[in-house]
Amino acid sequence: MRLVVIGCTGSLAGPRSPASSYLVQTRDQFGRLWTIAMDMGSGAFGALQAVLPPEALDFVAISHLHPDHCADLTGLAVYAKYRPGAAMESLPVYGPADTPHHLAELQYSHDPNSEGGDFNYGAWSEGVGISVGPLTITPFRVRHPVEAWGFRLEGPSDMDPHKRVTLSYSGDTDTCEGLAELAAGAELLLVEAAFEEQRDVARGVHLTGRRAGQVARAARAKQAVVTHLPPWNDPAVTLEAMSAVYPGPIWLARQRAFYVI
C-alpha cells in the first residue's frame, strides 16, 4: 500500500500545494492497481490529473464538506460529464449524507433538481467498512465543527503482499475517541496539525503539533505524516512540537511525495 500526496495545505490552496487530497493505492493478486482518493480540496483536481487519469479512480472518500476538502469535486463532476468516453457514472463517491446536494449547490445551482452529477453516491456509517478491491476503508466520526470523518484503511503491504497493513487518516479533527480508534496500531498515520499550541487556543476544530504527537504516541503508530498546515504556519514549529512527545519517525507531507508501507 502506498500514500501519494496530491494536496496538503491546510484551510485553502497554498503557494506550494493544493488543499487536502491524497491517493491510497495497492495492487491485487492479479497485478491490477486500485486507487482510492481521500478528499478533493480546492486546487486538487488539476494536480490529480498530473498523477493519473481520473478514470483510474476506483473510489472517492470525502471526509467533510469544507471547501478545502471537497471543492474540487466540481471539477471531477465536469470531467465525468463532458469528457468523451469518461464513463464515470458508476464511480462511488462517499461522504456526509448531504454530499450530493452540497455538490449540486456548488456546481449545478441553476438546476434545483440536480443532485451534483452522475456518481454512485453513498453516506458513511460509523465503523462500517467498505471493500475497494483488496482495500477496506472504515470511517470513524471525528471532532470538527461540521459532520466529519477520519478513515482507517487496511490492505496488502508493498513490502510483503501476504501481510496486511493499516494506513490511518485523521481528516480534520481535535482529539476524540474516533481519532484514537482509527489510529490504533497504524503502520502510517496521516495526521493534521493546523493549529499552533501557543496561538490557536480554540478546541474542537484542529490538532496542534503537540496534540498530533500525543495521538500518534498513544496509538503506537509506527510512523506519522503531518499535514494540513496553513501557508502562514512554520512547519519547523509543528515538527518540533510533535517530536517532543512522539518518538517515531515524522514526515512533513509535500505535494507529489509518496510513502510506502
Image: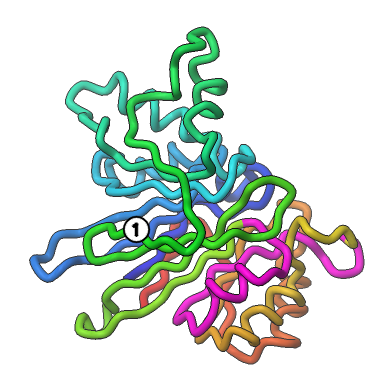
Mark 1 is on which residue type? Ile
| Residue 161, horizontal then vertical, whole percent | 21, 80
- The residues colored magenta run 172-200
Q: Identify which residue is drawn at 61% across, 75% down.
A: 180
Q: Identify which residue is drawn at 69% across, 74% down.
A: 212
Asked whether 236 or 195 is in front, the reply is 195
| Residue 48, horizontal then vertical, whole percent | 40, 44
Residue that sits furthest to the bottom in the current view? 247
| Residue 99, horizontal then vertical, whole percent | 51, 35
Position above or below: 43 against 236 = above
Colour logic: rainbow
Asked whether 80 or 133 is in front, the reply is 133
Q: Quadrant of residue 217?
A: bottom right
Density class for disc 1 (Cα within 10 Å; few <14, some 14-19, many ≥20) is some
> Circle 1 — which element?
strand
Q: Identify which residue is drawn at 54% across, 68% down.
A: 190
| Residue 244, horizontal then vertical, whole percent | 75, 87
Q: Is residue 95 in the magenta section?
A: no
Q: Quadrant of the N terminus?
A: bottom left
Location of mark 1 (residue):
130
